[in-house]
Amino acid sequence: MNKSETTVQYDLEIPPAQDDAVRFRRKSIFETSSDFEAPSPVSYDSGSLTASDDEIDHLAEKPHLAYIPPPDGGYGWVVVVCCFMLEFFAEGPTSAFGVFQDYYVNEKFQGRVSNATISLIGVLNSSCMAILGVVSGKLCERFGYRIVPLCGVFMLSLGYFLASFASEPWHLLLTQGVLCGVGAALTFLPAAVIPSQWFERRRGLATGTVNLGIGVGGIAWTQFNHLLIKRISVAWVLRLTSIIVLALCTVSLLLIKTFQSTPVQQRPNLQSLRNRNLLTFMAASFFTGISSLVPFFYLPGYAKDIGISSSGGALITSIANVASLTGRLAATVFSDYCGPVVILLGAYVLTSSSILLIWTATHNFSGTMAFGIVFGLGYGAIFTQTSAFVAKFFGVDALPVFVGLYYTVSGFGYLFGPPIAGVLLEKTRSWGSPYIGLKLYCGVPMVIALIAIVAVKVNMRKSAA
């Protein structure tokens, strides 16, 4: 055997790098032994957002290179801060749409439109953002995590700017609804995906911190909109929002980088789509989508109907967002210890009980405030766990597709949420208890989602036994 042959044989038999790769990617509960293949023991730290074909081919020819796990820190924290900003500006305003809805129904278009019609603006925004999650994921995989989100930021900013000139409700449906929703769909996905690439041991902390952007954004945008709509008009509030979103989101995106531990990404195992645990979890996301936006859209109007001032209604909505922020923080801290399914279970208990036991039984400021706090805690915890759940059971490489799928399914739920709740509100006003039809419609789907999460937990325990 010559020297060259000896070297080749040695490279093929050397085990440490392969062992590192196997230790890093644990077998998913959704994969059979035959499905599971360890990733190539190659390292790749992308200084740019995408790897060129030459780089991939060059690294793939060197299987003896040591595997480098995510740094669990370093520049990853810069990425976390930038992704936090994207969540703040892409999804935060949706949580504050109730202020706009109250203004549009009772002042700008008073007597011309119903709550159900105006709620479609916020619903279209949320639904487009969610339903296009899979499309956004595929576009990011194809064109990179910079070009696609930058296009989204431009569309988001343009949507708010054009909405400032709206004179008819349908103008707002197309601008603040559809255009902003599509822009947000293209913008928010990097925030949901990239932090998990930089972290392993601290992944729950990183993704949870990013998700705090929605809660902080809901608080800030609620107060921002409430204070300035009366002082400088809704048109200038929308224009200022457009300028702020364009400037700060662009800076954040320019600082975001991806991190890949292997040069060639592992493709998601599409056989997993037939797994009953995944399907049950997706069903929970659909019913969660039906319920989750209703309180934020209708709390300001509900507060006014039971005798609370408009500032009091805005305060309740803000406190609900503060509670959502607290729930996100708590879920972030405990996620790496308890696991995403346990966190989700507790969160669904809080949200469903707050609607059916607190909101339906109280009709005053203190009771409504208590509902806002408990609901906010559960709501915040629910939406911190999606990326961690997918990363744990499918692997980091599956994040763009499966996180996008989760948001797509919940987006269809959004379409059945606030609009139908608005119709029920008008049809059940004579039932005596304020908003009782809306409250029941909000609570029952959340209970169904809770049952689905319990089913996932039971199935996982049986599989582990």
Image: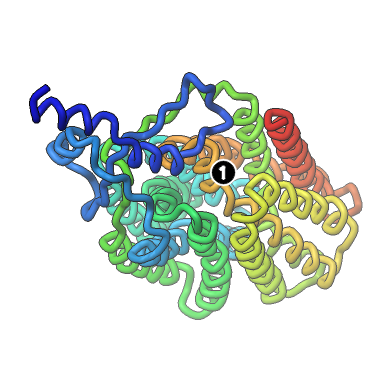
Tell me what residue is drawn at x 45 percent, y 50 percent: 192
Q: Position of residue 182 (x, y in %)?
A: 40, 45
> Can see residue 159?
yes
Location of residue 8 (image quadrant): top left
Q: Position of 303 compared to 227: left or right?
A: right
Q: Is residue 435 above or below residue 315?
A: above
* Element assignment for label 1: helix
Location of residue 162 (image quadrant): bottom left
Q: Residues within 10 Å of mark 1 (few under 14, many from 20)?
A: some
Q: Is residue 145 above or below residue 310?
A: above
Q: Position of residue 240 (x, y in %)?
A: 38, 71
Mark 1, residue position: 389
Tell me what residue is drawn at x 41 percent, y 66 percent: 81
Query: What colour scheme governs how the chains and residues are painted in the rendered image of this protein?
Result: rainbow
| In the foreground, 120 or 369 | 369
Q: Amino acid at mark 1?
A: Phe
Q: Is residue 64 above or below residue 226?
A: above
Q: Is residue 75 above or below residue 147?
A: below
| In the foreground, 315 or 325 | 325
Tell me what residue is drawn at x 23 percent, y 45 percent: 50
The total number of labels drawn is 1
Q: Position of residue 88 (x, y in %)?
A: 47, 63
Q: Position of residue 289 (x, y in %)?
A: 63, 43
